[in-house]
Amino acid sequence: MAQEYCSEISLPLLLSGSDRDLNLESTLEELQLYNFQVETSCTGTEVARVFEKNPLLPGAILVEQGKYAGMISQRRLLEFLIRPYGQELLFHQPLSVIYSYARTPILILPESTPILAAMQLALKRSPELLAEPVVVQTVDNTYRLLDVQQLNIASWQIRGIETQVRYERSQAQMIQNDKMASLGRLVDGIAHEILDPVSFIWGNLTYVSNYSQDLLKLIAAYESHLPSPNKEIDSLKEEIEFDFLEQDILQALTSIRAGAERLKKLVISLQNFCHIDEVYPKPADLHACIDNILLIINSKIRGEIEIVKNYGSLPPVYCFIGELYQVFMNLLSQSVDWLLDEAVRYQLNPIKKADKPRIEITTEVISQDSTTPGAPDSRWVAISIRDNGSGMSQELKQQILDSLSVKKRADKETSLAVSYRIITARHGGKFHLFSEVGVGTKFTILLPLL
């Protein structure tokens, strides 16, 4: 049958796509594409015969001396057929003449274009072009045809997958939130049980300190009024090392007071960290929040990391303080883990000179230009956490940014993705990540001031 056609018409070929299941990142090269190229010197009659034998063929790629010249769809060619005198006037003319009349905007996309992005671009075309096929350009600069209906079906399949993923993620998140709330209430109860005896110790320290000083005063008064030293008393004083005891008892009470105060602060920090089931935002001191987190992770730092706090003057910020505790815990723990890994590498390779691991925490109130004309500038609380580690590679940074993206959400939600959602979705804020190899990593959080 090939001899019935123009010698410069190749028989249409349907190229099978990938046998993999479609996913959120599937591209056009995974779909079935048509390979049908026709020289513009061939006539419309000859191409119509091919369309008649292949009714599913969406169109033809037009070439001139092997080079891409355009595309004419089967629908567009049939429109010329049904016009008055269309067959007599144009159908026996070369395709170059017909194409000059039928020239319409053509959507040309690389084969690496994601299917969802291609569908969005196809829907942006004018209504009379929505049924036109899409021209797909391959890496070797050849051109294929994609039926827009197939693109639509593939897009709906992916949308269904995306909806299912979102549903499963929301269910998992609800379960996770419930677990965290239950854990928070449990830890809050334990912290409360610890706080009671600590408060008892703290409250009685003042009395014990006063009683000790009174007893020492009484002993001093007895010594001043005794006519002569008593051997038994002198022996007992020497046995109990009274001179050292007199000096050390006040220092021991001071140490006990400092330990009780530290334990009290730690328990209060745990209680604040567990308040993750709040319904309404409340004003909170962000500096106290950060200090409490540093107190909790202090045992992890072990003096190997220098903490530099550049606190500005911040007003109380309306927020879900329990969730912000989780964010600051995630970011600071992430920076600490990176720096501790760096410290281990430097110990294994002492020849390499490095600065002491350091984390700088900076807070300030900033203003940003409003996007609405005539509206006042918006005010934000900016919190930045910067470390002097080795920084991230471009690949790792891209993976983290992809995990923050809604379209490219990772299968397993990371702590940074949770922090990103809390800042942006729950607080209407902004979350920025900067990292450069050899410089370090910086997280910046912007929270709006009401």
Image (tube, helix red, strand yellow):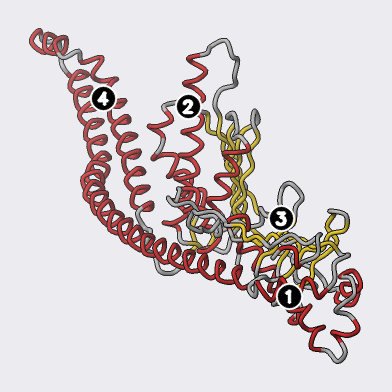
Residues packed near mark 1 inside 10 Å, few (<14), some (14 to 19) or many (20 plus)? many
Which of disc 1 and disc 4 is earlier in sequence?
A: 1
Q: Which element carries disc 2, helix, strand or loop?
A: helix
Q: In the figure, residue 381 lies in which quadrant? A: bottom right
Q: Which element carries disc 4, helix, strand or loop?
A: helix
Outermost residue toward the bottom in this view = 84
Amino acid at dot 1: Gln
Amino acid at dot 2: Asp
Gap between marks 4 and 2 measured at Cα: 43 Å
333 versus 183 height, above or below: above
Tag on residue 249? 4
Tag on residue 110? 3
Amino acid at dot 3: Pro
326 versus 310 height, above or below: below
Q: Which element carries disc 3, helix, strand or loop?
A: strand
Return the x and y of residue 68 as percentages of the image width and height: 83, 57
Q: Residue at x 28, y 54 (%)?
A: 183
Q: Nearer the viewer, mark 4 or mark 2?
A: 2
Q: Which residue is mark 1?
A: 74
Gap between marks 2 and 1 measured at Cα: 63 Å
Residues packed near mark 4 inside 10 Å, few (<14), some (14 to 19) or many (20 plus)? some
Q: Nearer the viewer, mark 4 or mark 1?
A: 1
Quadrant location of the N terminus in the rendered image:
bottom right
Q: Residue at x 75, y 52 (%)?
A: 142
Which of disc 1 and disc 2 is earlier in sequence?
A: 1
